[in-house]
Image (tube, grey):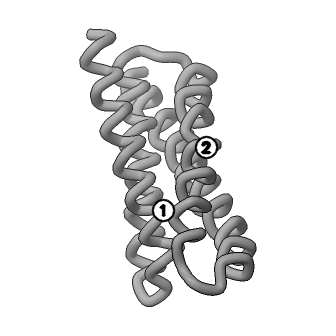
């Protein structure tokens, strides 16, 4: 079960990285991408609850992805023109998206746990 959980969490981590990269680089699609990012956060919350993990452990799994998400997004942005300005502009967007995904994780986790009571 642990290997299955790790595989699913890794897939969700990759999915959120792709979505956040697109969120930063595709301003015309931000609204729909933002909703997708929140859905991935909610999916992670549901899965961690289904695996019987504590909320603290669920948040810790999510936080482990924060630094790589920011680092990777910044590296991707560095390959374009107007690097400094775009990177500076991207950081608050990335943080906001990650924070909203975390809030969605907690809400979905709590909702799933409350269904079991």
Report the quarter where the C terminus lies: top left
Residue 20 vertical placement versus 11 (above, below): below
Q: Position of residue 110 (x, y in %)?
A: 51, 34
Residue 77, quarter of the rendered image? bottom right
Give left or right: position of 88 versus 17: right
Q: Position of residue 73 (x, y in %)?
A: 55, 60
The first of marks 1 and 2 along the sequence is: 1
Give left or right: position of 113 versus 43: right
Which residue is at a point 53% across and 78% down the rendered structure image? 80
Q: Position of residue 97 (x, y in %)?
A: 58, 61
Name the residue beneath numbered marker 2: 66
Report the quarter where the N terminus lies: top left
Residue 102 vertical placement versus 64 (above, below): below
Residue toward you, 112 or 73: 73
Residue 82 vertical placement versus 43 (above, below): below
At mark 2, the secondary structure is: helix
**In the displayed image of the protein, which residue is found farthest to the bottom?**
28
Residue toward you, 100 or 12: 12
Which residue is at a point 65% across and 78% down the rendered structure image? 83
Residue toward you, 15 or 109: 15
Residue 26 vertical placement versus 96 (above, below): below
Q: Position of residue 16 (x, y in %)?
A: 42, 52
Name the residue beneath numbered marker 1: 20
Q: How packed is label 2: few (under 14 Cα within 10 Å), some, or many (20 or more)? A: some
Which residue is at a point 45% across and 41% down the rendered structure image? 108
Which residue is at a point 54% across and 17% down the rendered structure image? 54
Separation of residues labelled 1 and 2 (CA atoms): 11 Å
Give left or right: position of 87 versus 13: right
Q: How packed is label 1: few (under 14 Cα within 10 Å), some, or many (20 or more)? A: many
């Amino acid at each position: 079960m642990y290997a299955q959980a790790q595989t699913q969490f890794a897939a969700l981590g990759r999915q959120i990285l792709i979505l956040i990269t697109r969120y930063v680089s595709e301003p015309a699609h931000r609204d729909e991408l933002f909703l997708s990012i929140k859905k991935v956060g909610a999916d992670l919350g549901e899965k961690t609850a289904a695996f019987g993990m504590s909320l603290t452990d669920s948040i810790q799994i999510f936080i482990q992805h924060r630094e790589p998400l920011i680092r990777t997004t910044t590296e991707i942005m560095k390959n374009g023109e107007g690097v400094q300005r775009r990177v500076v502009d991207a950081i608050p967007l990335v943080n906001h998206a990650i924070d909203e995904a975390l809030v969605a994780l907690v809400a979905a986790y709590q909702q799933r746990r409350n269904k079991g009571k």
